[in-house]
Image (tube, rainbow, N blue to C red):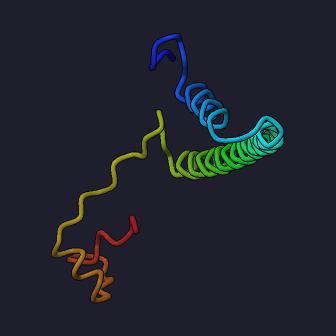
Amino acid sequence: MALFGFGETRAERAVRKAGERMERRYAPETRRIKEREAAVKAEARRKADIEHARKKTQLYKAQAEERESYTRKRRATQEARGARFGRLPPAPKVSKRTKRAIGRGVTRKRGAGSKIGWL
């Protein structure tokens, strides 16, 4: 991704700029030591990034598997309840009055509680 001309990425530019600062600031021996330390740090960071990415991938796979099993289970229960084409059959329409009666515990054969059978 060329951002700063010469086809440099941000990271490459940062490395180049740091190198230029080092040249201005330190004697050759000190510079070599510092460059070595920077290389070690960069390698450690790279390894950590790879490890982190691997763990994330594992986590995402596990979560996907969990979701998948949940979906399978739900689909199975819905099919047992008569679902076709991924949808449940329509439940009988129950009025607010009926629901209130059911909530109060009315369970007569006729009248408000007569629609209790579907629950």
Quarter occupied by residue 111: bottom left
Residue at position x 83%, y 42% in the image: 33
Nearer-the-camera pick, 16 or 55: 16
Point out the image quarter for the C terminus.
bottom left
Q: Measured along the vertical axis of the image, is residue 87 above or below residue 102? A: above
Side (left or right) of 60 relative to 4: right
Side (left or right) of 86 relative to 93: right
Q: Position of residue 26 (x, y in %)?
A: 70, 41
Nearer-the-camera pick, 84 or 58: 58
Quarter occupied by residue 99: bottom left
Q: Position of residue 35 (x, y in %)?
A: 77, 37
Q: Measured along the vertical axis of the image, is residue 10 above or below residue 51? A: above
Residue at position x 61%, y 48% in the image: 67
Nearer-the-camera pick, 59 or 96: 59
Residue at position x 45%, y 19% in the image: 4
Q: Position of residue 25 (x, y in %)?
A: 64, 41
Q: Measured along the vertical axis of the image, is residue 38 above or below residue 8? A: below
